[in-house]
Amino acid sequence: MDEIIIEGGTPLSGEVSVSGAKNAALPMIAASILTGGKFTFRNVPVLRDIDSIERLLSDMGVAVETLGNTVHIDTADLNRFEAPYEQVRQMRASILVLGPLLARMKKARVSLPGGCAIGARPIDLHLNGLSLLGADIKLSHGYVEASAKKLKGAEIYLDLPTVTGTENLMMAAVLADGVTILRNAAREPEIAALAGMLNKMGADIKGAGSPIITICGVKKLKPVSTVVIPDRIEAGTFMVAAALTGGDILVKNCNPDHLQALIHKLEKTGAKIQVRDDGVRVKGGGRINSVDIRTLPYPGFPTDMQAQFMVLMSVANGFSVISENIFENRFIHVSELQRMGADITISGNHAMIKGVPKLSGAPVMATDLRASASLVLAGLVAKGTTRISRVYHLDRGYEALEKKFARLGATIKRVRAKA
């Protein structure tokens, strides 16, 4: 098992290019099974979660070839409609094959994903929506078993703007008879990206990126080539790193429109931000002001940036409050930051943070993907050595993060942990 070792205290500077978005690539790859044929995906990040969904599709008879950041998929010989527990337990996003399998194969058997470290994330909204589209849903022995001779358009109101729920229902509805309207749909850029790919395939989707999405069902779809959008969370992580270390970083290959909530809060901390044609430049240095944040569905402040921003507030001047409104257990990184000297108190879904002059390097353990990133950031600004274990979490969502930070001047390396 790998560990990451960091000697902190160096201001970071230079240019970094952001990889493709995992949370866009996963549903787009899942959408390929809506029809038979050859797809090409470019700007796909090399990550454990991408490998997981590729192996899942391979088990279903799909031919997958990965060449660096390009993935070729041939779905002509799809011959299974099951996503077994062994695959789904490795990555919750495997539930995204439920909608497209049902639409194409008329049936699907997908393991219930269960809970995860940051919260339960139930899929009731997926199943209720599919039922409204005419699917017969049964839960048996830990599996969702769905079937439908023909899906039919329906009006679906989502109690919560679930991202994977919106994506699953959108994929199921593109081949349904009639019109489907998703109300209170999630608005994330990754949903708009998926809709763009589906429309390129021949679907008729309007309103993606807004709370109301209208899908007019079509008879057939065609395979396409497409490019995955940049990862806004990776971009945000580098932006926070610049402000945190008093550095100067140009974050390239990102979409500033997807980062407005973070840009607004970073500017309040005192960071200087310049939106350029070739990226976003973030310059730190001097006083870091304390700023309160509340995580909200997009376009609000992203829950996936909460842990990273908490590190910045840990060394800010004054007192701040971070309210986590998306996932109930997303403060599990706090105990590790406290080991490094952060002054954080938890009360319900609120974290009260009193900034300290500096953090101290320490051995810490990653507990989930974004917690891993926050510990890397903490190590970059801490005095002394930080050793982070269980960094396999990091490899689920960041492509070669330690190498990118090293090119920005960080003293950081990955090593094999001692047995």
Image (cartoon, grey):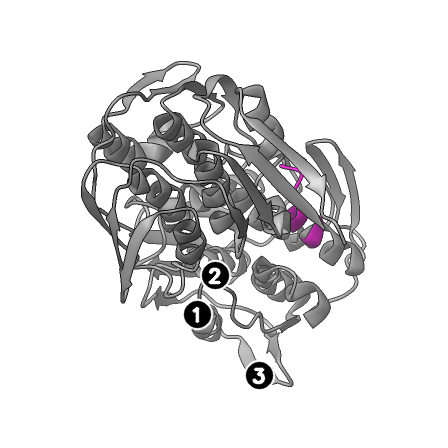
Q: Position of residue 228 (x, y in %)?
A: 56, 35
Q: Amino acid at mark 1?
A: Gly
Q: Amino acid at mark 3?
A: Leu
The residue identified by callout 1 is 129
| Mark 3, other Cα within 10 Å: few <14 / some 14–19 / many ≥20 | few
Rendered position, 89 above or below 231: below
Q: Nearer the viewer, mark 3 or mark 1?
A: 3
How much space separates mark 3 and mark 2, taking CA atoms? 18 Å
Based on the picture, tell me whether residue 393 belongs to the magenta stretch: no
Q: Magenta stretch mostly in which secondary structure?
A: helix
| Circle 1 SS class | helix
Q: Position of residue 97 (x, y in %)?
A: 62, 60
Q: Amino acid at mark 2?
A: Leu
Side (left or right) of 233 relative to 141: left
Say whether marks 1 and 2 touch (CB < 8 Å): yes
How much space separates mark 3 and mark 1, taking CA atoms? 15 Å
* Mark closest to the chain's N terminus, 3 or 2: 3
The residue identified by callout 2 is 169
The quadrant the C terminus occupies is: bottom right
Q: Which segment did they paint magenta?
A: 45-52
Circle on res. 139: 3
| Mark 1, other Cα within 10 Å: few <14 / some 14–19 / many ≥20 | many
